[in-house]
Image (cartoon, rainbow, N blue to C red):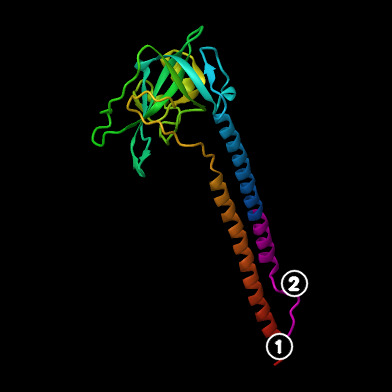
Amino acid sequence: MTVRVPLRGWFAPVPMIAGVALIALTCALGRWQLQRAHERIERQARIVALQNAPAQRITAQPVAADAVLYRPVLLRGTFDVAHTVLLENRPHVTNGVSRPGFEVLIPLVLEGAGRRAVLVNRGWLPRDPVDRTRIAPYTTPAGEVQVEGMAVPHASRVFSLGGKDGADEAGQRLRQNIDLDAYAREIGMPLQPFVVQQESDAQDGLARDWPRADLGADRNYGYAFQWFAMAAGVLGLMVFYGVRRYRRLAGASEPA
């Protein structure tokens, strides 16, 4: 004769409450990650639309970053070669192979009333495998030039013990990172509050196949899967131990 055990007897109260709370928490975190992924997808769609907009001409007049970010821009001015900065540890993938190198940043003194520059990321150079200070040849046009590019919030960044603004690297040609405000004070010239990734080809020995904007929605989907998988795992454990408890109690209740 099989003895029926009430449903409330399947689970010990404390583990059951803890399990339900953990499932609720992990499901909430999973839903939050899904929401973050959807927000990033929508933002990336807006960025793609901006990238296809007509180019906006930038002069020495101050421009708010929000007005031009991720838009094509057209610049005219003169490169301030004396303040060239090479950002180190910037890998570049060529034919499926990642190579170490530098990104070449040079201020472009803009046309128009007043004296103002914009920092231009001109492209990528390979690093000498033996001597990092031996820079591969590239050319910078003299005189007034026209540059086409894309406005981005800042130059690429890597982890640095000296901090993201690279204040301890002021005056150096080779650096890990660069901050626009600190760099403007260093060169004694106001800068537009954004960086321009050059896209116009100048036949100067620099690579300019910039990566597409990726706001990381795939990572959020991955995190959401992990949270939901954790919730499913906790539920599975609750069912497993509940069934085992049921069998133990039912066996103990059977008549001799």
Locate the C terminus and report the quarter of the image it occupies.
bottom right
Q: Residue at x 72, y 74 (%)?
A: 9
Q: Residues in magenta?
A: 2-25
Nearest to N terminus: mark 1 or mark 2: 2
Q: Is residue 13 magenta?
A: yes
Answer above or below: position of 250 versus 230.
Answer: below
Estimate the spatial distance between the alpha carbons at disc 1 and disc 2, rounded to whole Å: 18 Å
Q: Position of residue 181 (x, y in %)?
A: 49, 21
Q: Residue at x 51, y 36 (%)?
A: 213
Q: Which residue is mark 2?
A: 8
Q: Is residue 24 magenta?
A: yes
Q: Quadrant of residue 244?
A: bottom right
Answer above or below: position of 227 versus 3.
Answer: above
Q: Position of residue 175 (x, y in %)?
A: 37, 28
**Which sits in the foreground, 216 or 256?**
216
Locate the N terminus and report the quarter of the image it occupies.
bottom right
Q: Give the amino acid type for the residue marked by disc 2 in the picture.
A: Arg
Q: Could you say whether the residue bearing mark 2 is in a helix, strand or loop?
A: helix
**Which sits in the foreground, 101 or 41?**
41
Furthest-left residue in this view: 130
Q: Predominant secondary structure in magenta? A: helix
Q: Could you say whether the residue bearing mark 1 is in a helix, strand or loop?
A: loop
Q: Residue at x 57, y 47 (%)?
A: 220
Q: Which residue is mark 1?
A: 254
Answer above or below: position of 149 versus 41.
Answer: above
- Number of marks drawn: 2
Disc 1: CA contacts within 10 A as few (<14), some (14-19) or many (>=20): few
**Which sits in the foreground, 248 or 82?**
82
Q: Position of residue 234 (x, y in %)?
A: 61, 63
Furthest-top residue in this view: 113
Q: Give the amino acid type for the residue marked by disc 1 in the picture.
A: Glu
Q: Position of residue 22 (x, y in %)?
A: 64, 58
